[in-house]
Image (cartoon, helix red, strand yellow):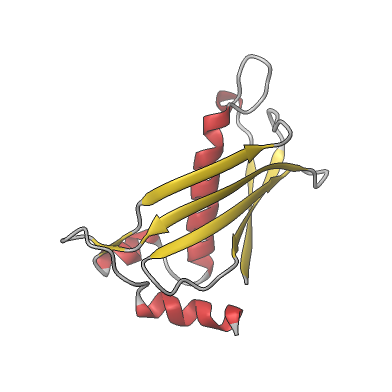
């Protein structure tokens, strides 16, 4: 299993009139945490694009448990429970506040696709090699 954590502070513009993070603002949190998890493996989305690979989001499920509030320091966990063997990669996310209370969970599926043809492909070999040790 591969797990990373990214911390983000809730900005005022991300909240509603009650000081609660607006539901759609969780998706940029998830995106930032995914990008950082890939970075921790030594890659960036830009590197993937240079290899001719894009990773569109094709499915999102999110469950809101408790509110995140203005100025909260959030920890966004990214968890890969399985090593991707086909064209899709499934990220699990958990958002926690400073009290370590679970605020939200998400399951987000992306596809590996060849940028030129928009056809599904398997995970690029360099990324696969970086992930394999976490699943042995």
Query: Residue sitting at 57 percent across and 30 percent down?
Result: 23
Query: Residue sitting at 49 percent across and 79 percent down?
Result: 130
Image spot of residue 16 (x, y percent): 60, 19
Q: Quick check: 23 left or right of 60?
A: right
Query: Residue sitting at 34 percent across and 66 percent down?
Result: 47
Residue 78: quarter of image: bottom right
Q: Nearer the viewer, residue 91 or 39?
A: 91
Q: In the current view of this chain or complex, which residue is farthest to the top?
A: 17
Q: Quick check: 37 left or right of 89?
A: right
Location of residue 94 with respect to 80 vertically, above or below: above
Residue 110: quarter of image: bottom left
Image spot of residue 74 (x, y percent): 69, 43
Residue 92: quarter of image: bottom right
Q: Nearer the viewer, residue 32 or 83?
A: 83
Query: Residue sitting at 45 percent across and 82 percent down?
Result: 129
| Image quadrant in which the N terminus is located | bottom right
Q: Quick check: 72 left or right of 124?
A: right
Q: In the current view of this chain or complex, which residue is farthest to the left?
A: 116
Image spot of residue 127 (x, y percent): 42, 75
Image spot of residue 84 (x, y percent): 46, 71
| Image quadrant in which the C terminus is located | bottom right
Q: Quick check: 84 left or right of 134?
A: left
Total labels drawn: 0
Q: In the current view of this chain or complex, which residue is farthest to the right?
A: 99
């Amino acid at each position: 299993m591969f797990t990373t954590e990214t911390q983000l502070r809730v900005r005022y513009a991300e909240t509603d009139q009650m000081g609660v993070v607006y539901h759609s603002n969780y998706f940029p949190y998830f995106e930032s945490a995914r990008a950082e998890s890939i970075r921790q493996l030594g890659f960036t989305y830009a590197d993937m694009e240079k290899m001719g690979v894009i990773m569109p989001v094709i499915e999102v499920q999110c469950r809101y448990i408790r509110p995140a509030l203005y100025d909260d320091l959030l920890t966004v966990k990214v968890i890969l429970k399985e090593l991707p063997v086909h064209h899709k990669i499934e990220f699990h996310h958990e958002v926690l506040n400073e009290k370590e209370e679970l605020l939200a969970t998400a399951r987000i599926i992306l596809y590996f696709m060849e940028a030129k043809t928009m056809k599904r492909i398997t995970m690029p070999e360099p990324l696969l090699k970086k992930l394999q040790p976490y699943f042995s």
